[in-house]
Image: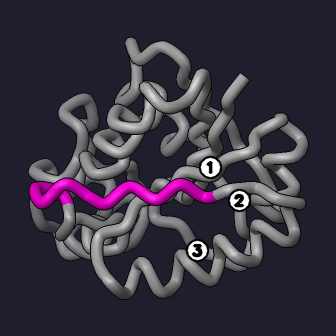
Amino acid sequence: MKIAVFPGSFDPITKGHVDLVERALPLFDKIIVAIGQNTQKKYLFDLHQRESWIRASLQGLAGIEVSIFENLTAHYCRQVGAHFLLRGLRNASDFDYEKTISQINHIVGEGIETLFLISQPAFSHISSTIVREIIKGGGDATPFLPDVLHIPVSRYVEKNHS
C-alpha cells in the first residue's frame, strides 16, 4: 500500500492545501493529512478547530485520513507505515527550504521519499501565514479558504486576541 503523509500546522487549512491533496490522491492509496504539534509554536487556531476544518474541507475524498502527531515527521511516517511525504512548492524559496528538509528526512526516515507538487498558479500566492495576518488584521480571508470554512473573523479576533 502506498501511503503518503502531508504534514503541516494547517493554521488554517487553505484552498492551496486542498488542491494539493486532491491532485496527489491518484498517486497514493492513502494520504494522511498530519497536523504537527510544536509546543514552541504559537498557533492562531487551536488544534481541534484545525482538525475539524481539515476534516470538513476534505470530506467526501476517499483515501484521506486526518491525524495529529508530535516530534519528528520522519518518525511519524515510520509509525504509520508511510514511505512518502507530500509537500507543495509555491516558489523558489519554498524549494530551497523543502529540499533541505527532504534530504534530512531521507536520512532520518531511512529512505523516506518526498514528493513535491508545484502549486497551481491560482493558489501560489496563498499561505497560512498570510491568511493568519489577514484574519488578525480583521480582513476577509474567505477567498483563500475552503468554502466549508466559515471563520467568524471579527468574533474570533475579539474573543481570543483582545
Q: Quadrant of the N terminus?
A: top right
At 89% from the left and 60% from the top, the residue drawn is 110
Stretch in magenta: 114-123
Closer to the camera: disc 2 or disc 3?
2
**35 drawn magenta:** no
Disc 3: CA contacts within 10 A as few (<14), some (14-19) or many (>=20):
few
Discs 1, 2 touching: Cβ within 8 Å: yes
Q: CA distance from mark 3 to mark 1?
A: 14 Å
**116 drawn magenta:** yes
Q: Is residue 6 left or right of residue 155?
A: right
Name above or below for residue 74 compared with residue 101. above
Choose top left, top right, bottom left or bottom right for residue 120. bottom left
N-terminal of the pair, mark 3 or mark 1, is: 1
Discs 3, 1 touching: Cβ within 8 Å: no
Residue 26 in view: yes
Closer to the camera: disc 3 or disc 1?
1
Q: Is residue 126 left or right of residue 88?
A: left
At 29% from the left and 70% from the top, the residue drawn is 90
Q: Is residue 60 left or right of residue 7?
A: left
Q: What residue would you read off at disc 3?
A: 42
Q: What residue would you read off at disc 2?
A: 37
Q: Name the spot of residue 162 as percent of width and height, x first.
A: 37, 73
